[in-house]
Image (cartoon, rainbow, N blue to C red):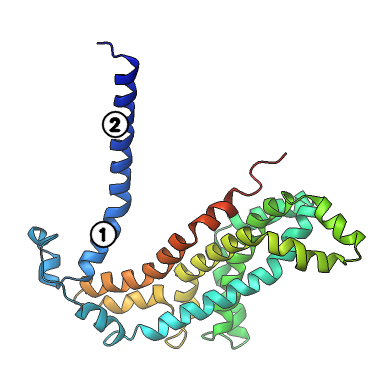
Amino acid sequence: MRFNGKTAESIRSAAFYVVLIAILFCAIFPFLWMILASLKNMVDLLNMDKLFRFKPNLGNYADVFGKYQFLRPLLNSLLIGVVSTILAMLFGLPASYSIAREKKTLYASMILIIRIIPAVSFLVPWYIMFTKLNLAGTYTPLFLSHWLIALPLIIWIMIPYFESIPRELEQAAWVDGCSRFGTFMKIILPISSPGILTAGLLAFIFSWNNFIFALVLCTDKTKTLPTAIFNFISYTEINWSGLMAAAVIITAPILLISICLQKYIITGLTAGAVKG
């Protein structure tokens, strides 16, 4: 069977949208189910006939902050994510700029290797070291362990971004009497804001979702959101409704930030991809 050009184009267009809808459904349905489950009681959650038709129950969210005391882990995650990201920025931006401008490809390869090494391999020596220093259970191990994860990520993202910035901008600043540090602070960083925003957001997301370091290094005082999920799992039952409400609370801030800043994230990730 042969089709003319217009019919064939219509078929390809229809097939494209069918595939696109299928992919979007697979990507969005788990989040939709999570939100719906967070509004159900346990009886409705286990009844597939009430997948979409049920009486919403906001008590699960009240239990998350009341019965399960989710506010402190939420503030801990926010504090640790912000501090570790800022520390990684303070060290990572100058390092990536130096590697980009001085063409230190060996250092860039070493950072990539560090990034590839599983973070869990640092956990045992990290725990022993902080135990010997009597710092186990404080915020310091969490700040530094999350910084250790975020630093290579920020450097690796920012190297191609700094490489894409023309050297003529720096040379013009030097002619006008600006120092190397002043050029970096007043010219390079402002025009690199999309890349910095992208690197910072990704570093914060890694910190926000980090589980293994918090599981070993934190106490009840420094517990973060991923470890607080264990509160919904007991010996006799799993509170799936409360667990889904907690999952929505954990996911929603990052999802909203990513949606609001997606333009800058895309710009930052694609910067330096094309040179010329």
| Mark before the other along the chain sequence, 2 or 1 | 2
Looking at the image, residue 276 lies above or below residue 172: above
Comparing labels 2 and 1, the label whose residue is closer to the camera: 2
Disc 1 target residue: 32
Per the model, the C-alpha gap separating discs 2 and 1 is 25 Å
Q: Residue 234, position in %: x, y?
A: 25, 78
Is 187 displayed left or right of 136 in the figure?
right
Classify mark 1: helix, strand or loop.
Answer: helix
The kind of residue tagged 1 is: Leu
Q: Can residue 81 be seen at all in this image of the molecule?
A: yes
Looking at the image, residue 19 lies above or below residue 159: above
Query: Quadrant of the image for the N terminus?
Result: top left
Q: Quadrant of residue 173?
A: bottom right
- Circle 2/circle 1 CB separation < 8 Å: no
**Frontmost residue, 131 versus 202:** 202
Disc 2 target residue: 14
**Frontmost residue, 147 versus 83:** 83
Q: Residue 38, position in %: x, y?
A: 23, 70
Q: Residue at x 77, y 49 (%)?
A: 166
Q: Give neighbour class at mark 1: few <14, some 14-19, many 20+ (Cα, 10 Å).
A: few
The kind of residue tagged 2 is: Ala
Q: Residue 35, position in %: x, y?
A: 25, 65
